[in-house]
Structure formats: structure tokens, C-alpha cells
Image (cartoon, rainbow, N blue to C red):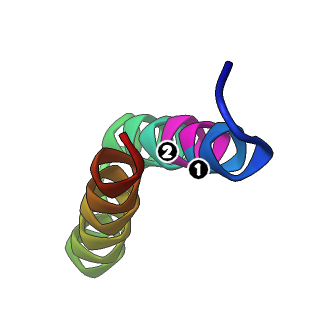
Amino acid sequence: MASPHLEALATRHKSIEGQIAQEMRRPVPDSMLLARLKREKLKVKDEIAGHR
């Protein structure tokens, strides 16, 4: 069973993926926002990997 912290990280990761997808659907995506979201997603992914 996953810890509550790990579940929160997984939820955050999925939320960021949704934000990225939403921004990509815009006629002119904000490249700075996308870069920030992708860095944040990678940081969360690394933290998840460190807990396994």
C-alpha cells in the first residue's frame, strides 16, 4: 500500500499533466508556463522514484 505522501505526489503529477495538456490545446501555448510545468512534473516524478 502506498503512503499518503506518495499518493499525494502521484495526484500532483497527474494534475500537472492535465495542466500541460490544457495549455497545449490553446491556440498559442505559453512556452514559459509549459517549461515551468514540465520542470515541476519532473521534480515530482523524481521524488516519487526516490520513495520506491
Check disc 1 and report its element: helix, strand or loop.
helix
Residue at image mark 1? 9
In this rendering, position of residue 36 left or right of residue 21: left
Three-letter amino acid code of the residue under disc 1:
Leu
Depth check, mark 2 against mark 1: the one in front is 1
Which type of secondary structure does the marked residue at label 2 adopt? helix
Judging by the rendered image, the residue that carries numbered circle 2 is 13
Give neighbour class at mark 1: few <14, some 14-19, many 20+ (Cα, 10 Å). some
Magenta span? 10-15
Residue displayed at 49% across by 45% down: 13
The answer to whether residue 45 is magenta is no
What separation in Å lies between label 2 and label 1 (alpha carbons)? 6 Å
How dense is the environment of label 2, judged by Cα within 10 Å: few (below 14), some, or many (20 and up)?
Answer: some
Residue 24 % position (x, y):
32, 42
Picture residue at 68% right of the left edge, 18% below the top? 1
- Asked if 13 appears above or below 1 in the picture, the reply is below
Residue at (25, 71) in percent of width and height: 39
Residue 23: horizontal and vertical position, in percent?
Answer: 42, 49
Which residue does the image show at 26% across and 58% down from the upper left? 46
Pointers 2 and 1 in contact (C-beta within 8 Å): yes
Query: Horizontal and vertical percent for residue 12?
Result: 61, 49
Tell me the quarter of the picture where residue 6 sits.
top right
Extreme residue in the top direction: 1
Q: Classify 1 as above or below 13.
A: above
